[in-house]
Amino acid sequence: MLRTRLQPLHPIAWWCWAGALAVAASRTTNPLLLGLILAAVAWVVTTRRSDSPWGRSFGALMRLGFVVVVIRVLVQVLFGDRVPGATWFTLPSIPLPSWAAGVTIGGPVTVQAVIGALCEGLQIAVILACFGAANSLASSFRLLRCVPAGLYEVAVAVSVAISFTPQVVLSTARVRDARRLRGRATSGLKGWRGLAVPVLDGALERSVALAASMDARGFGRRSTSPGRRRATAAATLTGLVGLGIGLFELLDSGSASGIGLAVILVGGALVIGGLLTAPHGSRSRYRPDRWHVAEWLVVAAGLAAVAGVVAAGNNNPNALFQPLYPLALPAGPAIALAGILLATLPSAIAPTPARTRLQEAVT
Amino acid sequence: MIAFDRVSVTYPGAAAPALENVSLAIEEGHLALVIGATGAGKSTLLRCVNGLVPHFSGGRLNGTVTVDGRSTEQYRPRDLADAVGYVGQDPDATFVADTVEDELAYAMENLGVDSAAMRRRVEDVLDTLNLHALRQRAIATLSGGQRQRVAIGAAFTAAPRALVLDEPTSSLDPVSAEEVLASLARLVHDQGTTILVAEHRLERIVQFADFVVEIGAGPGDLRTGTPAAIFATAELAPPVVLLARVAGWSPLPLSVRDARRQAPELRQRLEASVRLAAPASRGDRVATVKGLTAAYGPVPALADVTLDFHEGEVVAVMGRNGAGKSTLLHHLVGLRRAQRGSVEVLGRAPAALSAPEAIRLVGLVPQDPGALLCAETVAAECRDGDRDGGLAPGTTRSVLESLVGDICGDAHPKDLSEGQRLALALAVVLAPEPPLLLLDEPTRGLDYGAKERLSRQLRQLAARGHCVVVATHDVELVAEVADRVVVLADGEAITDGPARSVVCHSAGLAPQVARILAPAEWLTVEEVATALAARPPGHRTTP
């Protein structure tokens, strides 16, 4: 153990680690590598997640990933291009009018088509699992606590919204129950119309109670002028959006155009300026998350997986893909395997979360 | 510490003021209790203390409210956060963070308390409110009593000199309620905090109070004083006080402990008296639950529960928060399908019936009766009730009138008092004449008057042959109405027997009268009064 402190790992470190693994997964459709990445993520999650409600998001996103794989394969079989290769089975094909040229329904399905779709679906599922892992290991509430002072109000709004969603689901269930108790329709258009008004009504009442409680606990008690606060928040947000667009262009095309670079530069300047000039007000922070050696190591472990996969691709670009012509077992490039193995390191170096008994309030 | 000087509050659009000409002063280190019928203005009074009225609610406030020397005229609620902590009625709606520690620290973060002081203070509050074991738990996984204590802690970490609480125990089981009240008593005794609390279940809190504010029904009708002085005549009083009045005890006892010191004489007087109300013979079987097992995901809610329900009986289902009471009712009404075991009402499984069929067989008034009501006016609600049940026009309305007399048909259901709203929901459910009637926690937010009316209505329904099942924490209601008590613990039915013997022999479920007169099995003040009237005091006969 590198440390014995109680405080959990910095949420940003977890998100960087999971993000790096997602990037590694996005570079390959080799099912062996994808499977290994999934196994690495699952291992770290099972050893290091807390058993709070958000700890279960990994399982939820795994299930979503499975659905994605199934849909991807079904779409390929029903509407996909005619991929050349050995025909597995043939579906009755439905002729479409000439204006729908290019779209096919049914027809012969090749083994290659199904395996290719399976691998692509798996890639998306693994990326989803990485996102779920980040949520399981570091709740979005804790991530939002790390935002700089300039974006504090935005972060509060987002975290209130996150905690609001499950409550809306609960109150929808309650209103549905109430409709059945009155002997009314609970499904269909009529049922939904009867649901919306009471659910919104309940949500509104809740927000008013929440606002009163926040007000009574000193929220918004600041000395700086609201105008300046809003201006810096707006500048920071605009900058972040600009940075995002610029980075997307950079990653998408592999090289930045002049405009892309300019957007990145201006966005970066806005963000830094906004954060530097943001009024800190009189707020303080309870037990802020700190960045120690373990955080660096966790991020490095994630980057090792990316480096391994990229290096394997440089050695032999084909090693990252499932060979289809001819069909063969996927390659197992040693350097990529080693990188992914290193990515399981957090299960040993991250602090163990306090195990708490999960006790649902069943009423 | 808290002073009101000729305060009147009128909400926007309201015809009459919610509070009129209120003057009172609460001294430092007192636990002050606000009592009054529902709708008398208790919540308004509490929300005035930290300026939520009128800064947050709108409306007009005349007069001045001062807290710790600061007037709410100049200070907004957020500026008073270091002087007054406020805990609203529904703690679930007020949480900002996801874990206990973060929620506790929230107010201090807003006040800009420095990091070291914050750590110290959070530890203090964790200890004071006995939340230490829960510090890293997600709030969503806590029980009702734990959540209420977190809400109190969250208001208390900023070290306010005064704390204001609106019905802190109304949704809690007796044991959780005691935990919360013990925490409050500790804040008053150890830390000298001034506490102002509104509560309907007086039997739980009266013994802790130093000062009582009674808001009467009439405009400007307000009395303040020591508990003994106020409860000598107050209309709303806990059973211990009512029993003392019947027995003529003086000084007036406010706790079971005080009352027991004076009780031996009364026990003797009652010893010889005849016990009334022999257990009625059971009617036909209305509903059967056999081997019912249910779970929410991995969490078991009911384990192999087997019960019978009969015509003409009132059955109380009791147990801790989360013991499976609501789950049992949901199965009986068909909102949930039995995973294992069976549920039958008059030989049919309610979950398999269509909604219009089901309401003729079994009706449920849920925890929040307002959830059943969605029309704009009482009259429209009654018309909808007739239509839903396929009944003759006017049926629901006449049921409602038989329950509460005349209610203005143009009133919005949300503007009714808690008791009237419950009666309206009850009327809607009763109109199709279901033989099995279920009520989930019906006394939440009801004052003693409304509770007494409810008890009478439930007894009448049972006398007319309905089977009434009530899931409740309210031991006093059980003492009043129940023939039979079923106790659930962690999903298992651990006790099923006649109400008198079950509650009298339980440490947590015994009503105040039973505690005072134990080991004799008396449940209600009314019972004792009747027995005493039949046998004039001082007159003893040998058996």
Image (tube, helix red, strand yellow):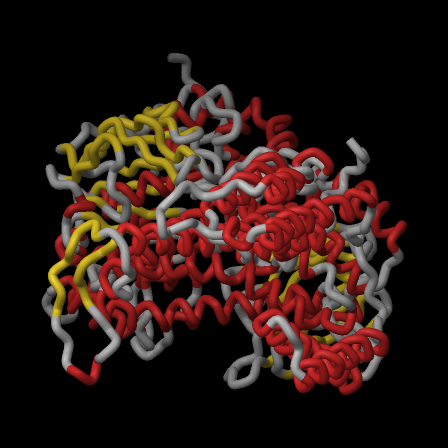
- In this view, the residue farthest toward the top is B543
| Residue at figure coordinates x 60%, y 27% from the top left | B260
Q: Quadrant of residue A78?
A: bottom left
Going by the image, does B338 lie left or right of A350?
A: left
Going by the image, does B124 lie left or right of B232?
A: right
- Foreground residue among A330 and B353: A330
| Residue at figure coordinates x 28%, y 66% from the top left | A81
Q: Position of residue B15 (x, y in %)?
A: 50, 84
Query: In the rendered image of this protein, does residue B2 appear above or below residue B439?
Result: below
Q: Position of residue B485 (x, y in %)?
A: 35, 31
Going by the image, does A253 lie left or right of B229?
A: left
Q: Position of residue A60 (x, y in %)?
A: 45, 49
Query: In the rendered image of this protein, does residue A74 appear above or below residue B278?
Result: below
Going by the image, does B159 lie left or right of B222?
A: right
- Foreground residue among A41 and A88: A88
Query: In the rendered image of this protein, does residue A49 appear above or below residue B257?
Result: below
Answer yes or no: is residue B61 visible.
no
| Residue at figure coordinates x 28%, y 59% from the top left | A84
Q: For the N terminus of chain B, which image quadrant?
A: bottom right
Query: In the rendered image of this protein, does residue B51 appear above or below residue B399?
Result: below
Answer yes or no: is residue B282 visible.
yes
Q: Position of residue B505 (x, y in %)?
A: 46, 22
Q: For the C terminus of chain B, which image quadrant?
A: top left
- Foreground residue among A237 and B221: A237
| Residue at figure coordinates x 73%, y 64% from the top left | A147
- Foreground residue among A122 and B295: A122
